[in-house]
Amino acid sequence: MTANISAADAAVTAALAALRTRAPSTITDRVLADAGLADRYDVVDGPTGPLWVSFAERGITGVAPARPGEDPAQLLAGRHGRRAVPGRLPARLRSSVERVLRTGRLGGLRVDLSHLTDFQRAVLAKTAQIPPGQIRPYGWVAREIGQPAAVRAVGSALNRNPVPVLVPCHRVGRSDGAIGEYAFGRPMKRALLAAEGVDTDQVEAMAERRVRFVGSDTTDIYCLPTCHHGRRVTERHRVEFHSREEAEAEGYRACKVCRPAAA
């Protein structure tokens, strides 16, 4: 009897051994992501090229350009400080991301900014309100959030934006009217603005001439140069100003849409 049991045990053990297989190399990543200890990432088509997008249950957590030779996991971790592993964007979330990239408006897309300070979140919330194809100075953002002296801090907050392009920090420029720098390089910033219809050469040329505002001599209203209303002014009726004081001394009123006085 004992011999028969031993033989049966040996047969079962041999059968189980035959079923043994190596765990897939991705199992650690999957376990971490399922446990909420890592974010997943996928690639989507952006307005100027492919983008890595990381995500979790709480929404989109990071965005970075998908450039050859760069490690997306390391790049995304540098934006939001969390490990990112390969994954697939759920269809509905992918559709929402593509809508934002197509329209240039964040809308109701959930982005996770929970690891940022209240000040940084305020800066990004205001930046998300800048319409596509328009540029606002750092000082404008600072005044709009009630922190007019925090111009440098605004620049730092935008440089740490974990979800660029979705929250359009490329639409914020220098207070002298120049386009300024970008976390992923000036060429990408110029390309993003150009994709939205901004004549970046004209913007830079106006900055060199120290032109800060444009007005219409038919409405006596002055705007920031890329404001939708300012861009509609024909050359015949267009007036350029070097400062808010200059515009208001000529009897011009600030546009209620772009609020240039805040700049």
Image (cartoon, rainbow, N blue to C red):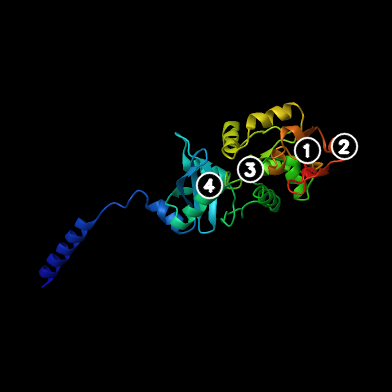
To which residue does mark 1 refer?
215
Q: Nearer the viewer, mark 1 or mark 4?
A: 1
Q: Amino acid at mark 2?
A: Glu
The circle drawn on residue 102 is 4
Say which label, 1 or 4, has the lower sequence index: 4
Q: Secondary structure at mark 2?
A: loop
Q: Between residues 3 and 195, which one lies in front from this camera angle?
A: 195
Residue 176 in sight here: no
The furthest residue to the right: 249
Could you tell me how far apart the alpha carbons at marks 4 and 3 are, in whole angstroms? Answer: 16 Å
Q: Amino acid at mark 4?
A: Arg
Q: Nearer the viewer, mark 2 or mark 4?
A: 2
Q: Nearer the viewer, mark 3 or mark 1?
A: 1
Residue at 66 percent of width and 41 percent of height: 134
Say which label, 2 or 4, has the lower sequence index: 4
Residue at 78 percent of width and 38 percent of height: 215
Q: In this rendering, would 250 be left or right of 85? A: right
Q: Between residues 96 and 203, which one lies in front from this camera angle?
A: 203
To which residue does mark 2 refer?
250
Say which label, 3 or 2, has the lower sequence index: 3
To which residue does mark 3 refer?
169
Q: Amino acid at mark 1?
A: Gly
Residue 198 picture quarter: top right
Q: Secondary structure at mark 1?
A: strand
Q: Residues within 10 Å of mark 1 (few under 14, many from 20)?
A: many
Q: How many marks?
A: 4
* 97 is higher (above) or lower (below) than 184: below
